[in-house]
């Protein structure tokens, strides 16, 4: 059984137990350390594995922790198990940072009542946005016909930012925590995590998997960037999940500027898709992926190539890794699979790609 971590403390305890060494890269707003753990051997180029920039996607986090001591390779392994140590602790925890006291949350009615006691910036039937202390909060009620409330409300807040920039202005440079509303998703649920949005200084609604190539950056992407500059990973993984995929999987690969890297990226992508298919898991259909946006090209079922220039919002971590360091893969496990199944798919992805990567340097 894969472990689900509900607090950063219990995650850190397991990371310490598994790692050869643990290094602190910085501290985030609740005082929690952003850590990197060492596993693997001494061989270079290094392997970099990370997850949890979207704290609602916890199977990736559990898989990243397992990779610290369960991934068999001679290469150096560097794991940042979660890039959002705050959001993973849930909505009551993030409210405590603005309120100074930790509430017990049992319903969206209750969350909205708490948010109305703050400075309400925007309110409409299912969305309340308010400022409490230094932080923004959004209560985003899941509703019928919304396969993924997190994505739906993310896009809705982006529209609000462009249509009513004055409503968002007090949040510039701040964090906004949103209720996940992932009813029925193991490891998250309605309030078990908080989805962390970062509002850029220009008022753009972004999140922790951005700001990898920007002068101003929150501590989590900045610490990640600094680590990567030191280890210069030959292959990088960012383990994500998607509620929109139901229980289906897709691989998010990146075109490589270097032709040799491109050849190995393609080889690894094909091997990953074969291994995922052989495990009996279902691959995402083209229409699943195109529902996310028009920035993916599909080379084979389940293997999707993300073009960040079509998406906008700057580079995410794997966009940045592919342009700067080498091979880069994101996973997207469907969040309505079992938690163990989701963790297995992430582990299969990493193990398979690392086998191909090792052949290159054998
Ligand atoms: Zn994600």
Image (cartoon, helix red, strand yellow):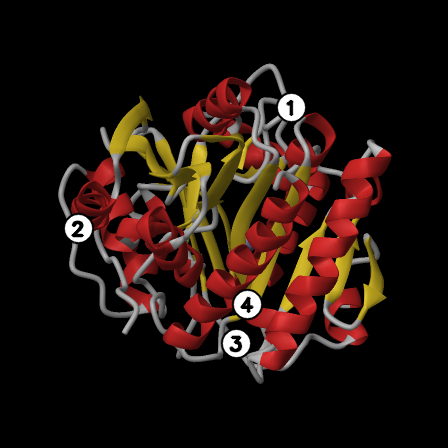
Spatial separation of the CA atoms under disc 4 and disc 1: 26 Å
SS at mark 1 in the image: loop
At 34% from the left edge and 29% from the top edge, which residue is drawn?
Answer: 134
| Contact between labelled residues 3 and 1, with CB atoms less than 8 Å apart | no
At 53% from the left edge and 55% from the top edge, which residue is drawn?
Answer: 350
| Residue for badge 1 | 213
Q: Is residue 222 left or right of residue 37?
A: right
Q: Quadrant of residue 136?
A: top left
Comparing labels 4 and 1, the label whose residue is closer to the camera: 4
Between 253 and 130, the one lying in front of the other is 253
Q: Is residue 106 left or right of residue 109?
A: left
User: How many residues crowd around disc 4 within 10 Å: few (fewer than 14), some, or many (20 or more)?
Assistant: many
| Residue for badge 2 | 10
Spatial separation of the CA atoms under disc 1 and disc 2: 31 Å
Which badge, 1 or 3, comes first in the chain's sequence? 3
Q: Position of residue 257 (x, y in %)?
A: 83, 32
The disc label shown at residue 143, or none:
3
SS at mark 2 in the image: helix
Comparing labels 4 and 3, the label whose residue is closer to the camera: 4
Q: Position of residue 328 (x, y in %)?
A: 65, 43
Spatial separation of the CA atoms under disc 4 and disc 2: 24 Å
């Amino acid at each position: 059984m894969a472990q689900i971590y509900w607090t950063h403390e219990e995650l850190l305890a397991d990371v310490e137990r598994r790692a050869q060494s643990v290094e602190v890269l910085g501290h985030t707003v609740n005082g929690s350390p952003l850590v990197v753990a060492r596993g693997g051997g001494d061989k270079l180029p290094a392997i970099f594995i990370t997850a949890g920039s979207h704290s609602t996607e916890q199977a990736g986090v559990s898989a990243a922790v397992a990779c610290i001591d369960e991934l068999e390779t001679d290469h150096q392994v560097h794991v940042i198990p979660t890039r959002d140590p705050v959001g993973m602790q849930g909505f009551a925890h993030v409210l405590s940072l603005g309120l100074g006291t930790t509430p017990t949350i049992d319903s969206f009615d209750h969350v909205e009542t708490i948010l109305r006691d703050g400075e309400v910036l925007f309110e409409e039937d299912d969305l309340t946005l308010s400022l409490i202390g230094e932080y923004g909060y959004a209560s985003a009620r899941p509703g019928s016909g919304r396969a993924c409330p997190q994505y739906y409300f993310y896009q809705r807040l982006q529209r609000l930012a462009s249509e009513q920039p004055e409503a968002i202005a007090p949040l510039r440079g701040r964090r906004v925590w949103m209720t996940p509303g992932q009813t029925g998703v193991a490891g998250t649920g309605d309030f078990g995590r908080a989805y962390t949005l970062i509002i850029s200084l220009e008022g753009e609604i972004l999140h922790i998997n951005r700001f990898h190539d920007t002068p101003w950056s929150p501590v989590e992407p900045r610490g990640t960037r600094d680590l990567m500059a030191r280890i210069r990973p030959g292959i990088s993984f960012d383990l994500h999940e998607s509620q929109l995929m139901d229980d289906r999987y897709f691989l998010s690969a990146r075109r490589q500027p270097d032709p040799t890297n491109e050849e190995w990226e393609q080889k690894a992508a094909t091997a990953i898709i074969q291994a995922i298919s052989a495990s009996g898991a279902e691959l995402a259909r083209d229409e699943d992926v195109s529902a996310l946006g028009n920035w993916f090209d599909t080379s084979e079922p389940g293997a999707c190539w993300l073009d960040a220039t079509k998406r906008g919002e700057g580079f995410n971590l794997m966009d940045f890794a592919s342009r700067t360091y080498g091979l880069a893969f994101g996973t997207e496990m469907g969040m309505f699979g079992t938690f163990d199944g989701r963790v297995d798919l992430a582990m299969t992805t990493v193990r398979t790609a690392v086998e191909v990567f090792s052949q290159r340097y054998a």
